[in-house]
Image: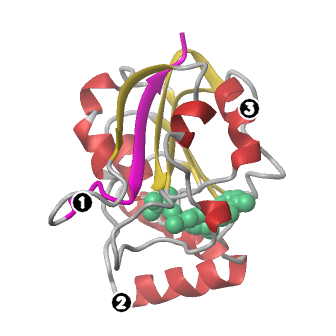
Amino acid sequence: MSEDNWDARYRAQIAGARRAEPLPLLLQYAHLLPPPPAPALDLACGLGASSLWLAARGYHVSAWDQSAVAIEWLRAEAGRRTLPLDAQVRDVCRQPPPPASCRLLLVAHFLERALFPSLLDALLPGGLLIYQTHTVERPPGATGPSNPDYLLQANELLRLAAPLRVLAYREEGAVGYPPSAAAGLASLVARKV
Ligand SMILES: C[S@@+](CC[C@H](N)C(=O)[O-])C[C@H]1O[C@@H](n2cnc3c(N)ncnc32)[C@H](O)[C@@H]1O
């Protein structure tokens, strides 16, 4: 989706006061997070609900997204909550995270396959990757992009993150009657050894 479309979408979300929630996967695996303070990066953060959650728990959070609308709102919201948070408008494909820069890397609902080597390099030893995004296999009516460039194939996230030690992985494809909230998503929690 183009920058303009994301800006428009966030403008509408902000105007409608529709509150973004932290990623449930992050909350589910909070016990595996490195202890704060630790450098954490929320890559392609959108409105940054997970960034705010992490900042409130004492992490040194960087939150990057190409949408100026989202980042402007996130900076203002962090200010309202008096949370320290480094929110930047940044094209992460042109400016990926530097090597050995984060102990926690969160990527939600964003896929750029060519970025994976940089993401793995960005983790410090012992650092944790939490990654969740949409899969090609999904139940009818599921949300998410339709362009296969932005959809994971079966087991693809495992392959992309192969050098890491997997702590948790879930990928249900389109199965389940009715499908669970995890259907149509691949979710990974993995540590750099
Ligand atoms: C589906 S949203 C996910 C936002 C957030 N992670 C979440 O789960 O709510 C995808 C985000 O990726 C951002 N994005 C797309 N391409 C990007 C790029 N090259 N650099 C930085 N952000 C990008 C969009 O602006 C959008 O905020």
Quadrant for the C terminus, please: top right
Q: Position of residue 150 (x, y in %)?
A: 62, 62
The residue carrying mark 2 is 16
Q: Quadrant of residue 99?
A: top right
Residue 71 to residue 23: above or below: below
Residue 191: say if magenta.
yes
Mark 1 or 2 closer to N-term? 2
Q: Position of residue 90 (x, y in %)?
A: 73, 57
Q: Is residue 41 visible?
A: no
Within 10 Å of disc 2 (Cα), the crowding (few <14, some 14-19, many 20+) is: few
Q: Earlier in the sequence, mark 3 or mark 2?
A: 2
Residue under numbered circle 3: 117
**Which element type, helix, strand or loop, lies under badge 2?**
loop
Can residue 90 be seen in this snapshot? yes
- Asked whether 74 or 127 is in front, the reply is 127
Q: CA distance from mark 3 to mark 2?
A: 38 Å
Mark 1 or 2: in front is 1
Callout count: 3
Q: Amino acid at mark 2?
A: Gly
Q: Quadrant of residue 25?
A: top left
